[in-house]
Amino acid sequence: MKNSEEIFELLKKEFGEMILGLDKDTPVDPIISIDPMQVHKIGAFLRDNEDLKFDSLMVLSGVDDANGTKTKDEDGTDVISGGTLSVYYHLHSTIQKHKITIKVSTSRENPEVESVYNVWRTSDWHEREAFDMFGIIFKNHPDLRRILMPYDWEAGFPLRKDYKNPEFYQGMKVPY
Amino acid sequence: MALKTETMVLNMGPQHPSTHGVLRLELEIEGELIISVKPHIGYLHRCFEKHAEAMSYPQVVPYTDRLDYLASMGNNFGYVVAAEKLMGIQVSERVEYIRVIMAELQRIASHLVAIATNGADIGALTPFLYLFRDREYILSLFEMTCGGRMLYNYMWIGGLSHDIHPDFVRKTKEFIKHFRPTVVELNNLLTFNKIFIERTANIGVLPLDTAINFGASGPVLRGSGLAFDVRKEDPYSIYNRLDFEIPTGKGLVGTVGDCWDRYYVRVLEMEQSLRIIEQLIDNIPEGDVQSAIPKRIKPPKGTVYSRVENPRGELGYFIISDGNLNPFRVKVRAPSFVNLELMGELSKGHLVADVIAILGSLDIVLGEIDR
């Protein structure tokens, strides 16, 4: 059993530059930030290393950080440009009994993160959901399509903070 | 000359009695044999996570009721535990006791539906009626406590909406006395029924390493033989003080991890829940159930991921607070959402009729899958 700081040091030694930092300034869980393009390699290390054995991905969540510049459009809806979208991975080891939170951030205009499909199979639907709700592209995911919204939803990504309801969907009026 | 054959695509659902809600399974079949199963979900999507961002923390509680609508107490519990962790609230002993009793009663009620519908789907309709009769008992206990039969809004951040009814303790003990013999009845009627065993033993076998890699939890994971329960693994509330066991699948009539094992784990878990209630029901401490409710619910900046053991598995809430009255982001890790992913893996090579048995043994609730 290791705490987040020990795991951070271990990762730092193994991967160096790809590990971006440890945020301890949270009331509950410390968060380790890593490079979004290396998450599959780091994930495989976390899963296979004898001292870590993170065999289960509890949850993968997309988040809109809403930290870009905000402007209003003509009907008063927020439009955000710049800033980041993030993905949080909450990992747990059924063998070593420890937990850890990993975070990756990617640009809002071109959000790309490597898929961890081949590391934890749980991520399959969770990544599809993050794509559906935030438009985050998971590279090398075998079947990245919408999951909760209709397959032909064209009005963007609903959980983004600047999402605007469309007026019509397939000829039907949306606001009722 | 060889006959030219090709596979056929069959849609099961979205309106189908055995899909337990609105779920479409796209089956690719060759004769009666399943080549692949693709679940299509989202028919019940009602933007819970987007709604949560527009409401204050206490206002989210009634929406959590509607996630897994067969285990609403458990959903409330998970959310308030997460919010209390974020705010550092310690609730009184009385509240903890009542919460655990409610959660365990809810577990029995939910498992009764799971067992009943699993049986009814594959042709055993009689146990269904008996089990719903017993579930009714629990629903009246809830109704007596907070007025709701399905959707309670009972657990609040820092307390409860109502204290228990003066008759609650007596009636709960009556229920336990009435319920124990009906489990024996259930075992005679369904569990060890030869036809039921033929339909579920050795069907949809889930090996343990696959279960862990797919993130399965709850009775689905325990059916494969791992004694993993969030109540023991990552104790919340007062579970670390309670004495109970974690039943696991043993392959009693077939292979470890088959449909029957997942079913039987639920039957055994009901007895463990009864044991927990018995330990608590006579010693509920005195006190005010609303004393710890803060005047103003405004958690500090930060994130929390907290999980509880719901009847269907590990229910997690990931909350990000930006220091405002509304949560910045709420993400629900719904156990059924993760367990349903297994559908394709489990059904390969089985017959169309087995898909029904497998789906029943996973015990999904579409309300929390689609959120």
Image (cartoon, coloured by chain):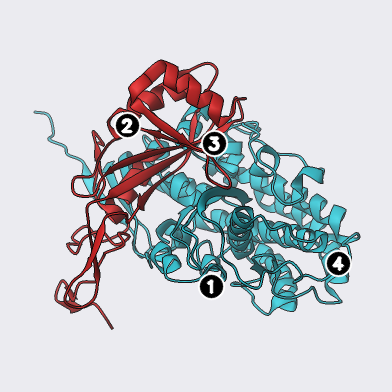
User: Callout 4, which amino acid?
Assistant: Glu
Query: To which chain does the residue with label 3 belong?
Result: B
Snapshot quadrant of residue B280: bottom right
Contact, mark 3 vs mark 1 (Cβ under 8 Å): no
Look at the picture and state if B182 lies above or below A106.
below
Q: Which residue is mark 4?
A: B174
| Front label number (1 vs 2) | 2
The kind of residue tagged 1 is Gln
Q: Disc 3 marks which residue?
A: B258
Q: Which residue is mark 1?
A: B59
- Looking at this view, is B305 or B17 the one in front? B305
Q: CA distance from mark 4 to mark 3?
A: 35 Å
Q: Amino acid at mark 2?
A: Asp
Chain identity of mark 2: A
Q: Which chain is red?
A: A
Tell me if mark 3 has few (under 14), some (14-19) or many (20+) residues whose alpha carbon lies within 10 angstroms of its own. many
Q: Chain of mark 4?
A: B
CA separation, marks 3 and 1?
41 Å
Lateral position of residue B100 relative to residue B22, left or right: right
Mark 1 against mark 4, which lies toward the viewer? 1
Q: Estimate how packed mark 2 is, as few (under 14), some (14 to 19) or many (20 or more) residues with alpha carbons within 10 Å.
A: some
Point out the frontmost of discs 3 and 1.
Answer: 1
Image coordinates for residue B19, horizontal then vertical, percent: 43, 58
Which residue has dot 2 on it?
A35
Point out the residue furthest to the left here.
Answer: B1
